[in-house]
Amino acid sequence: LNKTLLKRYNELFDEAEQAVTGNTILLNRVREARLPIQFAELEIARTEPITEPDVLKMKVDLFRQTAKELGVVHLNER
């Protein structure tokens, strides 16, 4: 994974979320499917200097909140 691919993946997930707006079940599936991408972003951020701490904090908070809301306690990286 790299920043260019992560940007594209996030664009696709944004489109998917918009496509299922109004359907909570499908929206939660999309949000759960996005968690590994969010985790990868956070892992990559650990290896780089922190230039935007507020953005990083927002990403961490969003990841934690989404995982908690969806009851996700484990991720499987493949």
Image: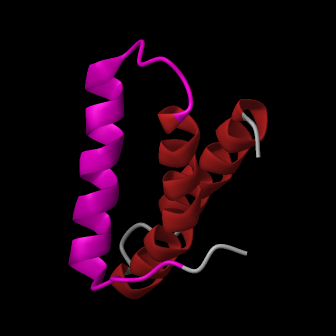
Picture layout, residue 1 above or below residue 56: below
The residue sitting at the top extreme is 51
Picture layout, residue 12 above or below residue 28: above
> Is residue 54 inside the magenta stretch?
yes
Question: Residue 1: image x %, image y %?
Answer: 76, 46
Picture layout, residue 17 above or below residue 26: above
Question: Residue 18: image x %, image y %?
Answer: 50, 57
The residue nearer to you, when weighing 51 against 18, is 51
4 relative to 67 in the view: left or right: right
The residue nearer to you, when weighing 9 against 47, is 47
The residue lying at 30 percent from left, 81 percent from top is: 70
In the picture, the quarter occupied by the C terminus is: bottom right
> Is residue 6 inside the magenta stretch?
no
The residue nearer to you, when weighing 70 against 23, is 70
Give the residues in magenta.
47-75
Question: Residue 77: image x %, image y %?
Answer: 64, 73
Which color scheme is applied? secondary structure
The residue lying at 40 percent from left, 78 percent from top is: 28
Q: Quadrant of residue 31?
A: bottom left
